[in-house]
Image (cartoon, rainbow, N blue to C red):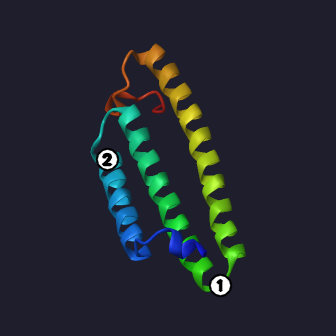
Amino acid sequence: MTPATLIPIPYTWILSLSAVLFVIGTIGVLLRRNGIAIFLSLEIMLNSANLAFVAFALEFAARRGVAVALTGQLFVFFIIGIAAAEAAVGLALFIALHRLKETIDVDRFNILRW
């Protein structure tokens, strides 16, 4: 069995879903004022990138071989690691800012101003 026969969905549909998720995440980052909601929107954007990497890896593996699929999956693992680090640092920052300002509304943060 080749990797392309395992998923009967065309990779263009998967890429379309990835683009829709990326747009939803971008709109969430631009329109939300709650810091945690912004980080959740960033996670949606990172997961849409993961979905695109997997779709391309499956398509290229069907055409060229298994080594290309492993490269795409390696990128996915790196993105998952980056997302975990971003979530840990982001939540730590918001906990510290909440203790200082007693809010997580990003419009009310002015501690970086002179």
- Label ID, residue 28: 2
Q: Position of residue 60 (x, y in %)?
A: 59, 79
Q: Residue at x 30, y 36 (%)?
A: 33
Q: Residues within 10 Å of mark 1 (few under 14, many from 20)?
A: few
Up-down relation of residue 23 to residue 55 (above or below):
above
Q: Position of residue 103 (x, y in %)?
A: 36, 20
Q: Residue at x 59, y 40 (%)?
A: 84
In this view, the residue in front, 55 or 37, is: 55
In this view, the residue in front, 72 or 98, is: 72
Q: Position of residue 1 (x, y in %)?
A: 61, 74
Disc 2 marks which amino acid?
Gly
Q: Residues within 10 Å of mark 2 (few under 14, many from 20)?
A: some
Report the side of 46 relative to 14 (left or right).
Answer: right
In this view, the residue in front, 41 or 108, is: 41
Q: Residue at x 64, y 70 (%)?
A: 69
In this view, the residue in front, 77 or 8, is: 8
Report the side of 52 relative to 63 (left or right).
Answer: left
Residue position marked by numbered label 1 in the rendering: 64
Q: In this view of the protein, can residue 77 be seen by the observer?
A: yes
Helix, strand or loop status at disc 1? loop
Q: In this view of the protein, can residue 56 be seen by the observer?
A: no
Name the N-terminal-most of marks 1 and 2. 2
Q: Position of residue 86 (x, y in %)?
A: 57, 40
